[in-house]
Amino acid sequence: MTASRSRSTAANPLELAWITPSAAQLASTADLYFVQDLLGRYLSFAWRSGQRLGLNSDQVVGSYLSEQFTPVDLNLYLARMRRAMHRGRAEQFRTGFRFQGQVYVFDLTLSPILQPQQASSLLLVIGRQQEPLPEVLPEPPIAIAPPHHAKLFAQIAWDIRRTLDPETIWQHTVQGLGQALGLQRCLLCPYELGSTAITIVAEYRQANLPVVLGEQLAIAANPALADALLSLRPTQAVVDFERSPAEPIWIVPTGYQEHPNGVLLLRSVEELSAGDRDLVWELADQVGTALAHARLYAQSQALALELQRANQTLLEQQQALIEAHRQSEALSQLKTDFLANTSHELRTPLTGMIGYLQLLQDDLADTPEERQEFVEGAYHSALHLLGIINDILDIARIEAGRLQLQSETVSLRSLLAEVETCLRSQAQAKGLVYRCQIAAGTELVDLWGDRQRLLQVLFNLVGNAIKFTLNGYVEVRAMAVWQPLCANGFDLPGYLKLEIEDSGIGVAPERQDSLFQPFSQADSSLTRQFGGSGLGLVICRRLLESMGGMVELFSPGEGLGTTVTCLIPLAPTATVA
């Protein structure tokens, strides 16, 4: 513990070297020259007459004012010393120092050693000795005791300077002061500029006194408290607590850079000595500085946390922009691929039409049957071209939000019959088995939607199943689900679950979601192999969603077939069969 105290108050010898004069410098400047800390400890010492009188610097350095070279009026000297440190400017006065029974009178100049951004803690003292030297004086009847409290106060100051936690500073201060001075009560209240009340946040008390921790003291109701905060000077007053009778309290404000930031409230059985009051006043400066540093640290931590959050937000925004840019580039590439494929799809039927018409124009048909074959070829090419153009126009209207649909009653049986009539022959031409199964109680139900668009959806889905199946089967299954729902503002009795299953080429799981994105295809090579714009599924999903339905696709994998499931609302008039 002793070593700890020494480190807390002793200065670095290298830092003091520049203010410790040589004998030659001393002879030309002053008679007395020394440096002290705020507790009155000599850190360097030089006296022109010291060596002749048997007092050298080694005897004095490290000792206190009361031990070797002692002011005649110790309390007066300490008050002057602390006032110089507190005000930050020099003090000049005449006083005597006692050594070996004699008093030597000096005109002193006490100058605080200022350091950037720090409170003054060292004092440079220069003295001019008065001639002739006074006669020998008798020793006083009572010797001045060493400043025992000063060491305890130095330890308190050291403890509070080692932390930036306000609560630790509060507790160390009140506990240290209360125990060092034997106080009945010691309280600490932080203060914010402009506050109308202060709160007791730390308390030291004797067991016989009531607890006042957490109480608030109104500044307006305690004029002495307001005066102490305004003047930054200690004062005595009677303070009335909520849970305790009025008590005589010594009010000691704490502050930093001439601004109050707290108050110490001390109650003692006996009046404190002038030396103890000076030590408390000096410690209050240390507490004020420590509280200010703790507050600055907390503010810097909060600012750092805010900057960290802002930086994280910026990083997230950057990632979002990067992802948006990536998606934009991917969409642009998809559009480019789509245009390339679409241009090919448009040219193919157009070329066929031109070829057939050229043959007819050149009258190259040898027989009426061959002429009819050319006409039908041109006609089917035109229909194919029309289908592609319709797909492109539909997706354009859907993307622009200008697709108009009619809600009407549509017979399920007639819808499936028309699809089967048109597409069964295509399935049979490829050697595929085409089946249509309608669950019991579902044959007579009506659907709710736009008939032409529903027909377009079924032609597209069933046509895809036939197109992408090389062998095996295509099966259409329909089943009514009676579960009330609301679609497009209509209360409907349920929906039709329509499944279109095939044994075709299938779709890899990782590619299935992309099939319903505009300008996207599971594999561009399929377009070249099987034809089509790649917009069919996108149009089907948008059309069904516009009518209150939905569509999903599932495939176990490539070569394992595909099942497309549609949910289509039932008409309001539909009833359970």
Image (cartoon, rainbow, N blue to C red):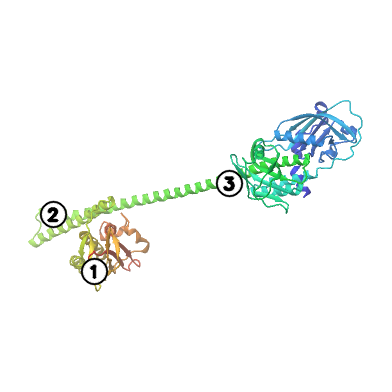
What separation in Å lies between label 3 and label 2 (alpha carbons)?
A: 83 Å
> Which one is nearer the viewer's eye here, 566 or 518?
566
Residue 283: % across, % down: 72, 42
Residue 36: % across, % down: 77, 37
What separation in Å lies between label 1 and label 3 (alpha carbons)?
A: 69 Å
Indicate the amino acid at tag 3: Gln
Residue 60: % across, % down: 84, 38
Secondary structure under badge 3?
helix
Q: Where 13 falls versus 573 (above or below)?
A: above
What residue is disc 1 on?
Answer: 575
Indicate the amino acid at tag 2: Leu
**Disc ID at residue 301:** 3
Mark 2 burial class by Cα count in 10 Å: few <14, some 14-19, many 20+: some
Looking at the rendered image, the disc whose residue lies closer to the viewer, 1 or 3, is: 1
Looking at the rendered image, the disc whose residue lies closer to the viewer, 3 or 2, is: 3
> Which one is nearer the viewer's eye here, 311 or 171?
171
What residue is disc 2 on?
Answer: 357
Secondary structure under badge 2?
helix
Counting the numbered discs, the total is: 3
